[in-house]
Image (cartoon, rainbow, N blue to C red):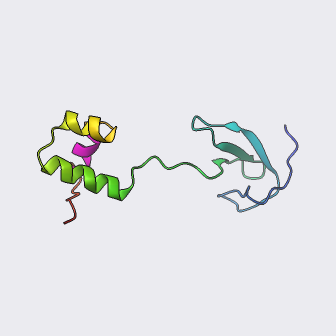
Amino acid sequence: MKKAKEVAERKCPKCGKTENQVNVGKNRSETQRCFCKDCKKYYTINPKTREYPEEVRQQAIKTYYAGVSGRGMGKIFGFSRANVYNWIKNGSKPAK
């Protein structure tokens, strides 16, 4: 096993300890993965969020209600039309 060194930003989310934390590579989004030797927990330092900002969601919903097709939404905003359909289905209404 790798030798653990203490770094301030490496803190286990389960047990809260900063010692015995080991780098174990990177995940698909190229963020650092760590392993706590004490509680055997794998975790990511500063994980990237995968959701769109609320302003983008509201603008996409407004555009959809203005009459743009789902395919047009994908071309304008650069994401799948299923995203907008799911936001509408889950109860998001455009802000006025």
Within the image, what quadrant is residue 12 found in?
bottom right
Magenta residues, start to end: 82-88
Q: Is residue 33 left or right of residue 95?
A: right
Question: Which quadrant, please, contains the N terminus?
Answer: top right
Does 57 appear in magenta? no
Main SS type for the magenta part?
A: helix
How many marks can you see?
0
- At which x and y percent is residue 17? 76, 61
Question: Which quadrant, please, contains the C terminus?
Answer: bottom left
Give the farthest residue toward the front.
76
Does 86 appear in magenta? yes
Nearer-the-camera pick, 71 or 38 = 71
- At which x and y percent is residue 60? 25, 49
Q: Is residue 19 left or right of residue 49?
A: right
Residue placed at 33% from the left, 38% from the top? 79
Location of residue 40 with respect to 7 vertically, above or below: above
Q: Is residue 46 left or right of residue 17?
A: left
Within the image, what quadrant is residue 75 found in?
top left
- At which x and y percent is residue 68? 15, 42
